[in-house]
């Protein structure tokens, strides 16, 4: 029965994709007329590109979700006890997603402050975590077999440990991380929509695999991965269309609206689907990018306004962009970071002397610039292809870890 | 116990109001810098006024709601059976409200098409109506005693009739009407925020009266009016601050964002509180304005781009604005409307001859222009005071009808 509703969801997603396609074409001139555009800084023309087009796709996504929700509800109506938890799960997820879209759109229009951008998703995910709590969901983690064996002489560990409220803090952090992770790995044509597409398609695949493993339709595991797909299939469909317009050469920019929407949707499905730890495996490039960015994000190292790669109109390529600052301005932690990264070859560092003072030049701290440090100047499309390949490789690695390695480390794998 | 949570809700609302005040001051220059402003057409200076400031108050409102929701939940946790319906009611209401805010903000930025503006709130209220349905809520209406007595010789009517799905259609229409009603009675300083403030304060008072009548805390009636206040107190607080900045002379404009947010919030509380018919009594000026506007909204009579009153810089007053069109362009229904309204003195009509053709001049069809037809040119502040007085009088009338007249017509009054 649930498979029929998945098919209906898939059908609505396809209709949503068609509507997205037509609405984007309709709204491109409207965005330009309303002066809602960004300038593509990696093109000779520096032409205006409509932004944030993510809001159109997000609106279509919400409409698809609103139209879909009554369907599974028709199934539940027949049951002796109405499954309130399931409806609560759907609605609390929708609240988090719709407020993330609102936040993103407000950020695109108003350039919100960082503290507001962190506060809002944290609060808007409270209903989701509350629903997780009242549904009596598990906060236990499985202890790896090897750890149990290692500490056995000292203490006898159980197979699972209930980490209780720490688990809620972890889920809250997943939400805040995901909401911002796509947004800080951005800036070249097709990157934001491309990485989201790869992750969401991978998570869809993961859900389908799990559904076939939990073949008993009434098991909770089956439901967890079904609800995850209810949210993800329309998202993947709308994102695919957005990617079509956003890939090199971009006809539209997705905006912060898309980044928040995308991150929040992926976080929500991982929590409702009980695979937030697995989701982190699919976010490995974003995690590395975040860790690598920390010195600039927290101003241990001076951070310029933009960290986009530098465009060279003569060769039509982009190369790593450079942050330059006085060596004396460097904080101690920043100096340590630079020394470590330089020694392992993960950072371009150059000292230059100007007016008797020593300046340091380092590449801006994103994995985009890191790729360019190793590969040298690349065409923008090639660069995005490389980054997409990394993302896909990480997805393959995630499947390997989740389904093969995990069975080595854990007795029980859900 | 519920009264304690109402007190907490009130406290959070007060904090929200303070935050609104400070954030509006912070964002006024940001809006101007981002070119998000309208021009005040009823002032000599024609100065830029930040718009849509409603989005800032709406964001604060959502934050207050997110922070409040865990509190009643703490109470429920102790109960043997968790009241899922109550949490569902809160969450489905929040979904409708947050998507209405998103729609309004998108409309402010993009000038959406009418069909999208009608479709979106209809769909976004589906979860709310579904929750109403699964909570087994009543769709019965009470038959007036007089009707029962009149038809008694023919058929014996029951005291209540279950009108089933017609009730859902009615609630859907309440939502779509309210979402747009504030928006079409707008255009002079303080009007949008002022009328919303009067209505929401009146509905708060109505809820408090009902709570004291249903003194048994566990009755459903008690809960209906409590949840209504949970949504309304923060709304009233944020709107009061917005009115302070929006009243003559406006330092901010509220935008469509506010109008949709306001209308949807009032519709949602009336449905969750089971008093959607009573709510319509508080919306009498908006209903009259809508009915009076129909000929222009549906283009039975030519409709100019703006229907604002006309500003006269010499006297610093506004007077009714005029729509002028060829008499031959008039459709039959439009001509009928004009003839009827003219005969009962509800329309200014003048025939003028230009270049051998007869032109008709009528006042634009809003109650703002209707007031100016009777009162003559007024200062903008006076005009808004008159409209606010009408709104307050209608609220008093609503209380009279609801608590005095209804007891004459119905045996049972909830």
Image (cartoon, coloured by chain):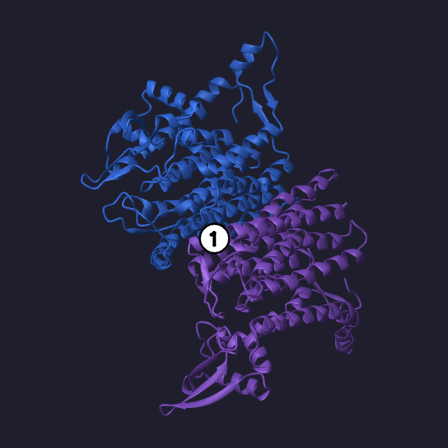
Chain colours: A blue, B purple
Q: Quadrant of the C terminus of chain B?
A: bottom right
Left or right: A279 in relation to A27: right
Neighbor class of circle 1 (other Cα within 10 Å; few <14, some 14-19, many 20+) is few
Q: Position of residue A135 (x, y in %)?
A: 63, 37
Question: What residue lies at 50% left-to-right and 51% top-to-bottom?
Answer: B27
| Between B155 and B200, the one nearer to me in the picture | B200
Residue B163 visible in the displayed image: no
Identify the residue position indicated by label 1 in the image: B29
Kindly identify which chain the residue marked by label 1 belongs to: B
The quadrant holding residue A291 is top left
Q: Percent position (x, y) of residue A153?
A: 59, 7
Q: Vertical placement of A269 versus B126: above or below?
A: above
- Whether A275 is drawn above or below B198: the answer is above
Q: Secondary structure at mark 1?
A: helix
Q: Position of residue B156 (x, y in %)?
A: 77, 72
Work out which quarter of the rendered image holds the N terminus of chain B and state it. top right
Say which residue appears at 33% left-offset and 58% top-offset. Answer: A29
Number of callouts in the render? Answer: 1
Visible residue check, residue A13: yes
Q: Nearer the viewer, residue A95 or B381?
A: B381
Q: Residue furthest top?
A: A153
Q: Position of residue B308 (x, y in %)?
A: 50, 72
Residue found farthest to the front: A356
Image quadrant assignment for residue B129: bottom right
Nearest the eye: B150 or B182: B182
Would residue B362 appear left or right of A378 to someone viewing this image? right
């Amino acid at each position: 029965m649930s498979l029929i509703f998945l098919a209906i969801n898939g059908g609505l997603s396809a209709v949503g994709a068609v509507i997205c396609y037509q609405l984007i074409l309709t709204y491109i001139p409207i965005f330009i007329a309303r002066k809602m555009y960004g300038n593509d800084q990696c093109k000779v023309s520096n032409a205006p590109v409509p932004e944030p087009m993510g809001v159109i796709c997000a609106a279509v996504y919400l409409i698809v979700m609103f139209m879909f929700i009554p369907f599974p509800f028709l199934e539940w109506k027949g049951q002796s006890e109405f499954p309130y938890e399931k409806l609560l799960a759907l609605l609390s997820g929708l609240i988090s997603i719709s407020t993330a879209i609102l936040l993103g759109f407000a950020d695109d229009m108003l350039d919100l402050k960082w503290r507001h951008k962190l506060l809002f998703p944290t609060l808007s995910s409270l209903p989701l975590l509350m629903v997780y709590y009242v549904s009596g969901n598990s906060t236990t983690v499985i202890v790896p077999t090897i750890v149990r064996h290692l500490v056995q002489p000292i203490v006898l560990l159980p197979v699972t440990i209930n980490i209780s409220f720490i688990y809620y803090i972890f889920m809250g952090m997943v939400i805040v991380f995901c909401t911002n992770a796509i947004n800080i790995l951005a800036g070249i044509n097709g990157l934001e929509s491309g990485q989201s597409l790869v992750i969401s398609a991978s998570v869809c695949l993961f859900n389908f695999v799990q559904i076939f493993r939990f073949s008993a339709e009434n098991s909770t595991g089956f439901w967890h991965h079904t609800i995850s797909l209810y949210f993800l299939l329309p998202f993947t469909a709308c994102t695919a269309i957005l990617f079509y317009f956003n890939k090199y050469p971009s006809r539209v920019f997705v905006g912060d609206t898309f980044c928040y929407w995308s991150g929040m949707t992926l976080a929500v499905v991982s929590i409702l689907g009980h695979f937030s730890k697995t989701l982190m495996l699919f976010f490995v490039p974003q995690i590395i990018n975040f860790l690598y960015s920390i010195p600039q994000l927290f101003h241990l190292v001076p951070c310029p306004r933009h960290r986009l790669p530098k465009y060279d109109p003569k060769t039509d390529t982009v190369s790593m962009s450079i942050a330059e600052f006085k060596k004396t301005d460097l904080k101690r932690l920043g100096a340590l970071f630079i020394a470590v990264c330089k020694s392992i070859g993960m950072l371009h560092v150059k000292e230059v002397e100007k007016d008797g003072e020593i300046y340091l030049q380092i590449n801006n701290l994103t994995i985009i610039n890191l790729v360019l440090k190793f590969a040298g100047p690349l065409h923008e499309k090639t660069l995005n292809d490389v980054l997409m390949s990394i993302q896909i490789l990480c997805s393959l690695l995630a499947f390997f870890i989740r389904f093969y390695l995990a069975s080595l480390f854990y007795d029980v794998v859900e």
